[in-house]
Amino acid sequence: MLYKTQGLRMAVDIIKLTAEKAPNFIDITDRIAEIIKKSDITNGLAVVFSKHTTAAIKINENEPELIKDMEMFLARLSPPDADYHHNNFDVRTVNMEEDECPNGHAHCQHLLLSASETIPVMDGKLQLGVWQRVFFVELDRPRERQVLIQVMGE
Ligand code: ZN
């Protein structure tokens, strides 16, 4: 999609993905770069936004040993097997789905991360540092997820 506004253009695309496990750091940098290329916007901003409360967007280094550390860090701060009020389905009445899963740990881990990252785009390229990559971070369980990419600029 391409919108024409007053001198400012905007392109929107959605990345759909399903993690293999949780937590799972999935590098989506190349897919975002492809969307920017398609948008034909050369200078502006890219907003990468997770439409979920238990899946985050975060910039970090894609180094497999570090990813293990980051997964352990999240599990230490908010272990899946700890007690969470959100997981007490005998008491809870709000936002209950038919396939509701106990995922209090994933919400708490998400507090430390974020739903989005904003990345400058110049000369048609994401202006990331040498070791910076954009990750979709699944915190809950494998399920279909959507990441919205909005590119604004000229
Ligand atoms: Zn939940």
Image (cartoon, helix red, strand yellow):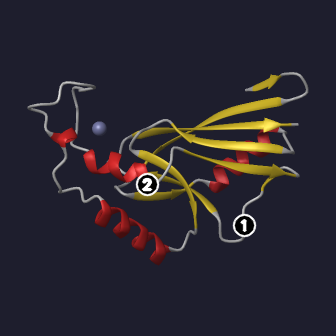
Q: Residue furthest right?
A: 7
Query: Marks 1 and 2: in contact by CB < 8 Å?
Result: no
Quarter occupied by residue 126: bottom right
Quarter occupied by residue 101: top left
Quarter occupied by residue 40: top right
Q: Tag 2's secondary structure? A: helix
Provide the residue designation for mark 2: 112
Residue 152, disc: none
Q: Position of residue 61 (x, y in %)?
A: 58, 69
Location of the N terminus by quadrant is top right
Q: Position of residue 80 (x, y in %)?
A: 23, 56
- Going from N to C along the chain, the mark reached first, 2 or 1, is 2
Q: Residue at x 71, y 71 (%)?
A: 130
The local crowd at label 1, few if under 14, some if 14 to 19, many if 20 or more residues have their Cα within 10 Å, is few
Most foreground residue, 75 or 12: 75
Q: Amino acid at mark 2?
A: Leu
Q: Is residue 58 visible?
A: yes
Q: Is residue 141 visible?
A: no
The local crowd at label 2, few if under 14, some if 14 to 19, many if 20 or more residues have their Cα within 10 Å, is few
Location of the C terminus by quadrant is top right
**Left or right: where does residue 73 sit relative to residue 51?**
left
> How far apart are the two marked residues, 2 and 1, measured between alpha carbons?
22 Å
Q: Position of residue 32 (x, y in %)?
A: 67, 48
Residue 61 higher or lower than 14, as above or below: below
Q: Nearer the viewer, mark 2 or mark 1?
A: 2
Q: Residue at x 65, y 34 (%)?
A: 13
Q: Position of residue 104 (x, y in %)?
A: 26, 45
Residue 129, disc: 1
Q: Amino acid at mark 1?
A: Gly
